């Protein structure tokens, strides 16, 4: 079996990416300034994280005098889609609905957000399936155990 590993953005690297997306092209000094309040990170830690992002091919670096300017090589929208998608990939497909409901109840939402969600839900209602099929491995969720009991 061949395992192809595509590089992933860690939670810490994600914090850096958000600053780059918002301010690019940006110096490591600006990134440090933005994050020093929120995270208790030293400049060296931030430099290491930026270096990893460059290595993984998510960030480009360009010399500008004696400093470096960093820009994103991946879009925020696409990365966000991958990230939210990967959260749901780790859940049994029969529990995706409940997980989404949980995410919604944990969130602070505006009336505008609610409208957006209502629209998304009513679009889904048009081609909703009767029962969602589980594709988990035996021992990774309770679906199979329940089915076997039924049989
Ligand atoms: Zn399952």
Image (cartoon, rainbow, N blue to C red):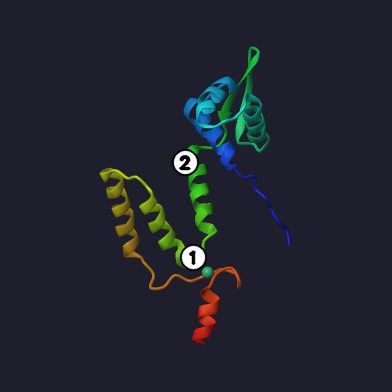
Question: Where does the image place residue 90, in percent across and percent down from the top left?
Answer: 55, 59
Q: Residue at x 52, y 61 (%)?
A: 91
Percent across and percent down for residue 145 are 55, 78
Does dot 1 land on a helix, a strand or a loop?
helix
Ligand 1 within 8 Å, label 1 CB: yes
Residue ID at (41%, 62%): 98
Task: Please state which of residues 121 and 100 is positioned toward the viewer in this rendering.
Answer: 100
Contact (Cβ within 8 Å) of mark 1 with mark 2: no
- Point out residue 47 in the picture as x, y percentages from the top left corner: 65, 27
Q: Which mark is residue 2?
A: none
Q: As rendered, which of 38 and 16 lies closer to the eye?
A: 38
The quarter of the picture where the N terminus appears is: bottom right
| Image quadrant in which you'd find residue 69 | top right
Mark pair 1, 2: CA separation: 24 Å
- Residue that protrudes farthest toward the front in the picture: 40
Q: Secondary structure at mark 2?
A: helix
Measuring 47% from the left and 29% from the top, which residue is drawn there? 22
Label 2: which residue? Answer: 77
For marks 1 and 2 on the same chain, the one whose residue lies earlier in the sequence: 2
Mark 2: few/some/many CA within 10 Å (<14, 14-19, 20+): few
Quarter location, residue 122:
bottom left
Q: Name above or below for residue 49 compared with residue 5.
A: above
* Residue 144 position by quadrant: bottom right
Which residue bears the numbered disc 1?
93
């Amino acid at each position: 079996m061949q395992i192809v590993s595509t590089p992933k953005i860690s939670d810490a690297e994600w914090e850096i990416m958000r600053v780059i997306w918002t301010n690019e092209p940006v110096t490591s000094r600006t990134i440090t300034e933005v994050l020093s309040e929120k995270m208790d990170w030293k400049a060296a830690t931030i430099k290491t994280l930026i270096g990893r992002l460059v290595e993984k091919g998510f960030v480009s670096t360009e010399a500008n005098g004696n400093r470096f300017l960093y820009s994103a090589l991946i879009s925020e929208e696409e990365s966000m889609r991958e990230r939210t998608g990967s959260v749901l990939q780790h859940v049994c497909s029969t529990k995706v609905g409940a997980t989404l409901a949980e995410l919604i109840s944990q969130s602070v939402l505006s009336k505008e957000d609610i409208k957006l969600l209502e629209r998304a839900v009513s679009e889904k209602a048009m081609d909703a399936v009767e029962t969602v099929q589980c594709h988990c491995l035996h021992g990774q969720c309770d679906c199979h155990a329940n089915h076997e009991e039924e049989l």
